[in-house]
Amino acid sequence: MQKFAVTDDLSSPDLEHKSTATFIKRALLLMVSLLTALFVIAIVALLIIVRNINQDADRQSAMLLDKAIHNRVDTLTTHIKDYAWWGEAYSHLHPNVDTDWAYTRQNMGATLWRDFTYEGVFVLDGNGQTRYSVINGQLVTRSLTEWLGENPLPKLLQAIDKPDAMPVANTVVMQAGHPALVAAARITTGDDSQLVSLPGPASTLVFIDVLDDKKLVALGEEYGITQARVQRKGAPKLAGRRGIATLPVDGHQITFEWKSEDPGRELMH
């Protein structure tokens, strides 16, 4: 009996050591698990914050790009009103076009391309036939429909000729894969009281502003947006992260893309 008791007393420290080691292992395992969970939670939270920061930046860029395009539309509208409601233009463009006055003397010729980059300037008679056309600053004989690829005039004239309608109508068509802002206005005597309006349908002035890649890049850079362009298949990919937004432009939904500032990248680093 004494021998058995002595053996039992000698083994109890080993049991205590094993119990302590097991407790420490469990505690360490719990701590590691908690730390791992905290790291996972922190990484997930960081990724969510980065995503939100980038989305906010993209929304801001989309708003600025939308503002830039609408400012371009407003400028186009102002310019065509100034030219269409100019008494001298009425005298030289309706009912017959004085090419010398319009193009040679630069009253409505290459200056519109050079100063405002309007790719198309057209004068149409009361029947919708093109009587004068300047494309990319060059006097040509192409009709509006031939160059544009479609005829937006019926829609524009319908909008202009409605009772109490705005005297200037705008629309958007795709020209060679790029959105083209088209503005039309009836040519009138304006505020020139010395001119008398001739009987018959009035002639129509049309300005076209094509938002090609080069123009969109310049337009975007004015608002801090890099490499803005229309999204289309087959185009080379932009380096880095892309911002994408579909914006309404005069009733048309057009998808644009640009090189995102990617502000979340610094946070990730």
Image: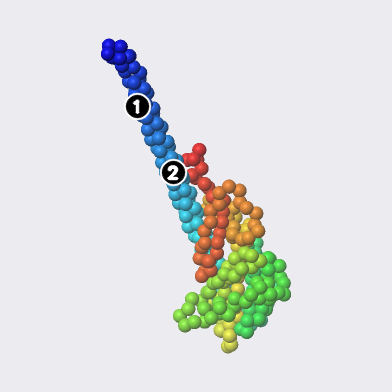
Give the answer, above or below, for where 250 lies relative to 232: below
Percent position (x, y) of residue 126?
61, 83
Q: In which quadrant will I find the N terminus?
A: top left
The answer to which of 152 and 9 lies nearer the viewer is 9
Task: Give the residue at mark 1.
Answer: 23
- What residue is at 34 percent from the left and 24 percent from the top? 19
At label 2, which amino acid type do we have? Answer: Val
User: Can residue 78 be seen in the rendering of this structure?
Assistant: no
Can you name the residue that lies furthest to the bottom here? 199
Percent position (x, y) of residue 36?
42, 36
Q: Residues within 10 Å of mark 1 (few under 14, many from 20)?
A: few
Q: Disc 1 versus disc 2: distance between alpha carbons?
A: 31 Å
Image quadrant in which you'd find residue 111: bottom right
User: Can residue 158 be seen in the rendering of this structure?
Assistant: yes
- What residue is at 47 percent from the left and 52 percent from the top? 55
Task: Give the residue at mark 2.
Answer: 44
At label 1, which amino acid type do we have? Answer: Phe
The answer to which of 186 and 51 lies nearer the viewer is 51
Cβ atoms under marks 1 and 2 closer than 8 Å: no
The answer to which of 88 and 125 lies nearer the viewer is 125
Percent position (x, y) of residue 81?
54, 72
Q: Residues within 10 Å of mark 2 (few under 14, many from 20)?
A: few
Question: Nearer the observer, disc 1 or disc 2?
Answer: 1
